[in-house]
């Protein structure tokens, strides 16, 4: 089984998704970009495990958002929208952003702090009942505006929040094209500090141009990751947690299409 905390295939794919997206625990996020919320809904309805990335739509319909039952909502992308500011800024959430978190709390939807500003992160930590970070890497290893600082990791770990390691080369190196060893270094850094219980893979496939080993292939990525972690002395149960069990637990504990999740869990 493959588990992925954040996949952007809906951003660029038309028609039915490939079969593996229905047979595995892959969360497909709808990125706002230049599209309307009405168009975003059409994409989200194709997903078994939907999420929304940047909900700063002018035509956002909260009732329709809740109807889709996303596993998480990412409030912003890198810039400013009606709810707050992305990682290009340090400013906190706007009043609408704080109000939206309250609605998400009431409906059991996780708040994703990926892309958010440092100030917005603090606001989310203080108010969200279920906070996650679906796709990121770590500033201690490579400085990038999208990466999390150690104090942010401490806050997330203290809450048992699930964190997804992204496959974006420019989050890990200055070369954009990264190797499996760069990706493993991120996993190992988090696991050494906090253990393996709250770590997952959030590839950002189709959302970044330069992935690990230049592949969008789950079979290759997960085989390489498993082999490399085993070589570092990680036990099979620890590897399984990172590769699929932690995220499967998250989806099973969510309010979304439970029949679909149960079927995935049997695989």
Image (cartoon, rainbow, N blue to C red):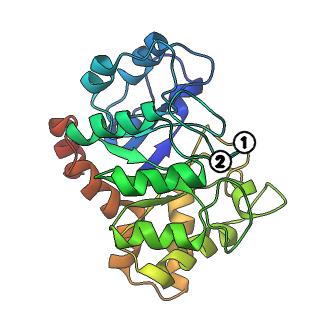
Left or right: 64 in relation to 107: right
Q: Residue at x 36, y 16 (%)?
A: 61
Left or right: 106 in relation to 52: left
Q: Residue at x 36, y 33 (%)?
A: 100
Image x and y of residue 177, in percent: 78, 56
Q: Nearer the viewer, mark 1 or mark 2?
A: 2
Residue 144 is at least partly visible in this image:
yes
Image x and y of residue 40, in percent: 47, 18
Residue 11, above or below 198:
above
Q: Which of these two is toward me, 144 or 197?
A: 144
> Which numbered marker is on residue 87?
2
Of all residues shown, which one is farthest toward the front?
Answer: 95
Residue under pointer 1: 209
Residue 170, above or below 82:
below
Q: Residue at x 67, y 68 (%)?
A: 139
Query: Which type of secondary structure does the marked residue at label 1 adopt?
Result: loop
Left or right: 97 in relation to 211: left
Q: Earlier in the sequence, mark 1 or mark 2?
A: 2
Residue 1 is at least partly visible in this image:
no
Q: Residue at x 33, y 68 (%)?
A: 160
- Quarter of the image where one finds residue 186: bottom right
What crowding class fits label 2: few (fewer than 14 Cα within 10 Å), some (14-19), or many (20 or more)? many
In the picture, which quadrant includes the N terminus? bottom left
Distance in Å between CA atoms under marks 1 and 2: 19 Å
Image x and y of residue 67, in percent: 25, 22
- Quarter of the image where one finds residue 150: bottom right
What crowding class fits label 1: few (fewer than 14 Cα within 10 Å), some (14-19), or many (20 or more)? some
Q: Which of these two is toward me, 251 or 231?
A: 251
Query: Which type of secondary structure does the marked residue at label 2 adopt?
Result: loop
> Which numbered marker is on residue 235?
none
Image x and y of residue 230, in percent: 49, 81
Number of marks: 2
């Amino acid at each position: 089984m493959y588990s992925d905390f954040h996949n952007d295939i809906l951003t660029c794919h038309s028609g039915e998704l490939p079969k593996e997206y229905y047979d595995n625990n892959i969360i497909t996020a709808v990125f706002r970009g230049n599209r309307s919320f009405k168009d975003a809904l059409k994409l989200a309805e194709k997903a078994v495990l939907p999420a929304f990335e940047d909900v700063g739509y002018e035509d956002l319909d909260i009732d329709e958002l809740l109807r889709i039952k996303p596993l998480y909502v990412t409030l912003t992308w890198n810039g400013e929208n009606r709810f707050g500011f992305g990682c290009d800024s340090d400013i906190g959430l706007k009043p609408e952003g704080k109000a939206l978190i309250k609605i998400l709390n009431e409906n059991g939807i996780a708040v994703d702090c990926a892309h958010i500003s440092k100030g917005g992160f603090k606001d989310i930590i203080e108010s969200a009942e279920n906070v996650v970070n679906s796709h990121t890497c770590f500033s201690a290893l490579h400085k990038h505006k999208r990466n999390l600082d150690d104090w942010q990791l401490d806050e997330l770990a203290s809450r048992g929040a699930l964190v997804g390691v992204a496959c974006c080369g420019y989050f890990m190196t200055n070369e954009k094209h990264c190797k499996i060893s760069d990706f493993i270094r991120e996993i190992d850094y988090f696991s050494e500090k906090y253990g393996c219980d709250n770590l997952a893979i959030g590839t950002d496939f189709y959302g970044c141009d330069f992935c690990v080993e230049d592949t969008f292939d789950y079979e290759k990525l997960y085989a390489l990751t498993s082999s490399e972690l085993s070589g570092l002395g990680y036990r099979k149960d620890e590897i399984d947690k990172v590769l699929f069990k932690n995220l499967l637990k998250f989806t099973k504990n969510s309010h979304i299409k439970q029949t679909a999740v149960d079927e995935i869990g049997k695989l």
